[in-house]
């Protein structure tokens, strides 16, 4: 089997290594350049390709005629996409006579679309996974080749779940490749009506609404915790990022009359939510500097906020 790989991120790194280990001839890798505005906490597929001696090109726009020509020149039997950020045009997919396949970070047909791991954590799911599927013009809509499930534990952050999904992607591809290389690619139905589709998330979507129930607030914090941008709240004109939190097993009694939001109680930072539930804030950062904020430092800021509200 001769392949062209469109890849990025940790899933791109691990799946490219699986292809290499299984003896797939990767003729070309297309990957992204790092963005200056992005926190690069993941592996670079360009580095992986260099290590494995595979030629690569940078391609931000797969519709660029130069990319199509590079793929055509590579003469692939198959095309793989492993966390490449852009939809690959049908005209490029058609250059692979044995098909084009994508690794998606959910159990399709659930959570089609962007950032599926973050959405799954946000919605309080207890399971997600990785799915290898055929690529079509419609995103994440082709038949399923194979998939592997992983658990989402109650306190898992999206970053922790993504690590599990990366392993699930590696396992799925490793298991599927022998049949694919023998020309017997499995084809399981991907029934879109039984699933869901979600678009990308913006940093502003991380704003905490403390009037919501504690379970919902906690899921948001887990879903966007670092290395993602983080859930945030504004106090007295300053922005704070909740980097780590927990639902307390036994919530401390709080004074009556406290409104939903951040509070300091018994030397701890507590998030009081709309249903009366609490979230214990274990790590609060000043957004402007990423410096840790202690309960002692937060207390006068909360007082300032209270004074402003009472004027």
Image (cartoon, grey):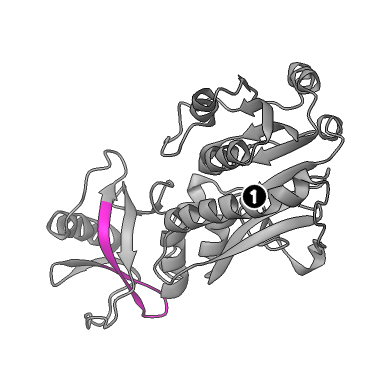
Camera-side residue: 219 or 212?
A: 219
Measured as percent of width and height from the top left, residue 160 is found at: 42, 57
The local crowd at label 1, few if under 14, some if 14 to 19, many if 20 or more residues have their Cα within 10 Å, is many
208 falls in the magenta region: no
| Picture layout, residue 184 above or below residue 258 | above
Measured as percent of width and height from the top left, residue 46 is found at: 53, 26
Viewed as shown, does residue 236 lie left or right of 134?
A: left
Residue at disc 1, secondary structure: helix
Instruction: Specify the segment rendered in magenta.
Output: 270-284
| Picture layout, residue 39 above or below residue 228 | above
Camera-side residue: 39 or 183?
A: 183
Viewed as shown, does residue 144 lie left or right of 225?
A: right
Magenta: predominant secondary structure element? strand
Measured as percent of width and height from the top left, residue 74 is found at: 76, 21
| Picture layout, residue 293 above or below residue 246 | above
Viewed as shown, does residue 259 lie left or right of 67?
A: left
**The C terminus lies in which quarter of the figure?**
bottom left
Task: Name the residue located 52 percent from the left edge and 23 percent from the top edge.
Answer: 50
Measured as percent of width and height from the top left, residue 146 is found at: 71, 58
Task: Identify residue for label 1.
Answer: 173
Whether residue 47 is visible here, answered yes or no, is: yes
**The N terminus lies in which quarter of the figure?**
top right
- Asked which quadrant contains residue 15, the reply is top right
């Amino acid at each position: 089997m001769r392949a062209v790989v469109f890849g990025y991120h940790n899933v791109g790194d691990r799946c490219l290594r699986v292809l290499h280990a299984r003896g797939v001839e990767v003729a070309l890798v297309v990957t992204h350049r790092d963005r200056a505005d992005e926190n690069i906490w993941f592996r670079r597929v360009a580095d992986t390709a260099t290590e494995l001696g595979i030629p690569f090109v940078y391609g931000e726009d797969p519709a660029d005629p130069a990319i199509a020509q590079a793929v055509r020149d590579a003469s692939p039997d198959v095309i793989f996409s492993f966390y490449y950020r852009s939809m690959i045009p049908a005209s490029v997919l058609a250059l692979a006579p044995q098909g084009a396949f994508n690794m998606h970070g959910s159990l399709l047909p659930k959570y089609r679309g962007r950032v599926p791991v973050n959405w799954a954590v946000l919605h309080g799911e207890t399971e997600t996974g990785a799915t290898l599927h055929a690529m079509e013009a419609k995103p994440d809509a082709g038949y399923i080749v194979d998939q592997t499930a992983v658990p989402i534990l109650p306190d898992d952050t999206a970053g922790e779940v993504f690590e599990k999904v990366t392993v699930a992607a590696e396992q799925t591809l490793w298991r599927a490749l022998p049949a694919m290389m023998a020309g017997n690619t499995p084809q399981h139905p991907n029934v879109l009506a039984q699933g869901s589709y979600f678009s990308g998330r913006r940093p502003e979507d991380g704003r905490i609404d403390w009037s919501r129930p504690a379970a919902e607030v906690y899921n948001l914090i887990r879903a966007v915790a670092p290395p993602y941008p983080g859930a945030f709240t504004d106090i007295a004109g300053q922005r704070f990022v909740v980097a780590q939190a927990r639902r307390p097993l036994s919530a401390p009694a709080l004074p009556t009359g406290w409104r939903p939001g951040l509070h300091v109680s018994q030397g701890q930072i507590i998030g009081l939510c709309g249903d009366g539930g609490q979230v214990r804030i274990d790590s609060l950062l000043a957004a402007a500097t990423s410096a840790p904020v202690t309960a002692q430092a937060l207390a006068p800021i909360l007082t300032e906020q209270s004074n402003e509200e009472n004027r």
